[in-house]
Image (spheres, rainbow, N blue to C red):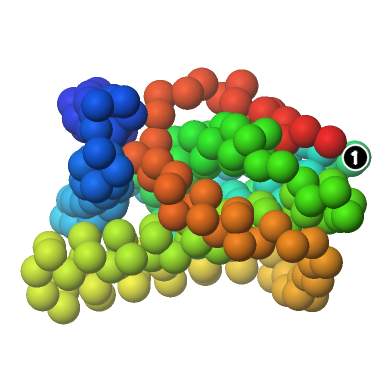
């Protein structure tokens, strides 16, 4: 992402985090940052439709480490899918190797957002008390599931709004074609891929995790790749 775009997003988030802001003002600044990230994705897609060399399809492998590796992998998938990327989860030791496929600009957006959201989730969990009658791990897993689900919903809404505001059915066709090309690339590498069974969670933290997802900043931050390894407690 360009430094100019990052600068705009950082300024909006700084305003959103100002203690003098009302909750409504803070939400408005955060929403604008999210809008910029989504608009950037559409702009890069339209540019690549005219000049494919500017934004090639690619892939990268992201290591997800314990603890709560499966839950962190779920958060990564929740970010990747609305941004038109696909990921394959592979077991690696006590964690996972997540193989991501997407256009370069979309992989960049996933990197930026997931890195920030992983840190935000860690902070949110640290500030959320576990009920005395509940197993901490079960509560935290359900909390993370709620957080990831709401983040995915918000990102899908932002992407849909950005596409609609960019004008006409041609944008939808460009974006659909990009999704198809990413899927074809994934199928070439994993022709016999199987879908994992739905997960069942027993904890009661889903609601508070979902509320934290509604408050989460989706504008991203310029955090380096070391944050991929941020833990979420035990």
Say which of 27 and 40 sits in front.
27
Point out residue 204 in the picture as x, y percentages from the top left corner: 74, 62
The residue lying at 52 percent from left, 40 percent from top is 117
Farthest residue toward the front? 132
Q: Is residue 78 left or right of residue 20?
A: right
Q: Would you place residue 71 above or below residue 120 in this image?
A: below
Q: Quadrant of the N terminus?
A: top left
Point out residue 207 in the picture as x, y percentages from the top left corner: 61, 62
Regarding mark 1 in the picture, which secondary structure is present there?
A: loop
The residue lying at 44 percent from left, 36 percent from top is 112
Residue 42 visible? The answer is: yes
Point out residue 66 in the picture as x, y percentages from the top left corner: 82, 37
Q: Is residue 82 left or right of residue 88?
A: left
Quadrant of the rendered image containing residue 134: bottom right
Say which of 201 and 127 sits in front.
127
Q: Which residue is mark 1?
A: 93
Q: Is residue 125 left or right of residue 42?
A: right
The residue lying at 79 percent from left, 61 percent from top is 203
Residue 58 visible? The answer is: no
Point out residue 157 in the picture as x, y percentages from the top left corner: 33, 66
Q: Would you place residue 57 above or below residue 20 in this image?
A: below
Q: Would you place residue 203 above or below residue 129 in this image?
A: below
Farthest residue toward the left? 167
The residue lying at 84 percent from left, 36 percent from top is 234
Say which of 83 and 104 sits in front.
83
Task: Please state the total of marks drawn on the protein image.
Answer: 1
Farthest residue toward the bottom? 169
Q: Residues within 10 Å of mark 1 (few under 14, many from 20)?
A: few
């Amino acid at each position: 992402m360009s430094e100019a775009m990052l600068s705009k997003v950082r300024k909006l988030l700084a305003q959103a985090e100002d203690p003098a802001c009302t909750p409504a003002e803070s939400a408005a600044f955060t929403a604008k940052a999210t809008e910029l990230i989504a608009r950037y994705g559409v702009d890069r897609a339209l540019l690549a439709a005219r000049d494919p060399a500017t934004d090639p399809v690619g892939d990268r492998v992201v290591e997800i480490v314990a603890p709560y590796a499966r839950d962190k992998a779920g958060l990564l998938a929740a970010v990747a899918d609305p941004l038109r990327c696909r990921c394959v989860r592979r077991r690696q030791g006590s964690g996972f190797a997540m193989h991501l496929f997407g256009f370069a600009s979309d992989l960049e957006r996933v990197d930026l957002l997931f890195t920030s959201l992983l840190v935000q989730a860690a902070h949110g969990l640290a500030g959320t008390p576990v009920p005395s009658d509940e197993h901490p791990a079960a509560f935290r897993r359900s909390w993370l599931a709620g957080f990831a689900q709401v983040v995915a919903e918000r990102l899908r809404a932002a992407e849909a709004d950005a596409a609609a505001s960019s004008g006409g059915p041609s944008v939808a066709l460009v974006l659909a074609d990009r999704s198809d090309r990413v899927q074809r690339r994934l199928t070439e590498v994993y022709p016999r891929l199987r879908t994992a069974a739905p997960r069942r969670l027993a904890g009661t933290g889903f609601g508070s995790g979902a509320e934290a997802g509604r408050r989460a900043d989706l504008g991203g931050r310029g955090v380096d790749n070391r944050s991929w390894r941020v833990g979420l407690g035990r």
